[in-house]
Amino acid sequence: MELVVMVGLQGAGKSTWVRGHLAATHAVVSKDHWPNAKRREQRQRRVVEELLAAGRDVVVDNTNASPEDRAGLIAIAHAHSARVRAVHLATPLELCLERNDRRTGRARVPLVGVLGTRNRLVPPSVEEGFDRVDVVSPS
Ligand SMILES: Nc1ncnc2c1ncn2[C@@H]1O[C@H](COP(=O)(O)OP(=O)(O)O)[C@@H](O)[C@H]1O
Ligand SMILES: [Mg+2]
């Protein structure tokens, strides 16, 4: 059983990568799926816990930019004896902004949102508690 924590800016290609690599095997959880829900963070944690408790492999598809954002997920994985892997979509800011600009409606994030994430982003590391860290460069 494993928990995969995606890391990357808005527009980095996380959801596309998840569709291509994990969607067939892992339950995909993202608080982006509930844009209007209250307490989205707590709800996401609860859903991840329930899926791991049921023995599923899970991927959390959010920016997960800072160690603080990730610590709770790592703790949940450890509590369920699941391995926990980070997949960092290390797409340069300029390319993320270009892709973001091409999106429409809700999928397009305000510039300050992307820049705010960039400022918070710390690359994931095994020191945080990940069993493995994969870095994906843009193709
Ligand atoms: N490898 C890629 N090459 C070119 N365009 C991509 C690639 N991955 C994603 N995109 C495009 O970039 C945009 C953002 O991708 P998405 O996977 O939704 O990013 P994220 O989930 O990180 O916000 C989408 O329009 C998508 O089609
Ligand atoms: Mg996405």
Image: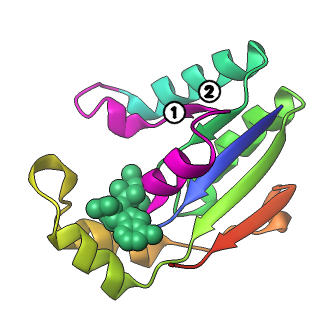
Residue span colored magenta: 11-38
The residue pinned by badge 1 equals 29
Mark 1 CB lies closer than 8 A to ligand 2 = no
Which secondary structure lies at badge 2?
Answer: helix
* Spatial CA span between label 1 and label 2: 7 Å
- Please identify the quarter of the rendering in which residue 32 is found: top left
Q: What residue sits 38% from the left and 28% below the top?
A: 39
Left or right of residue 21, residue 82 in this image: right
First along the sequence among labels 1 and 2: 1
Relative to 125, say whether 26 is above or below. Answer: above
Q: Are marks 1 and 2 in contact (CB under 8 Å)?
A: yes
Q: Does residue 17 lie above or below 79 as drawn?
A: below
Q: Is residue 137 magenta?
A: no
Give x and y (percent) for residue 116.
Answer: 33, 71
Q: How many marks?
A: 2
Kindly state the secondary structure of the residue where label 1 is placed. Answer: strand
Q: Nearer the viewer, mark 1 or mark 2?
A: 1
Q: What is the three-letter code of the residue carrying label 1?
A: Val
Identify the residue shown where x is 77% and y is 65%.
Answer: 133
Which residue was labeled with disc 2?
48
The residue drawn where x is 76% and y is 69% is: 125
Circle number at residue 38: none
Q: Looking at the picture, which amino acid does disc 2 mark? A: Val
Please say whether residue 28 is one of the residues in the magenta stretch: yes
* Residue 87 can be seen, yes or no: yes
Colour scheme employed for the rendering of this structure: rainbow
Residue 12 visible somewhere in the drawing? no
The relative height of residue 120 versus residue 29 in the rendered view (above or below) is below
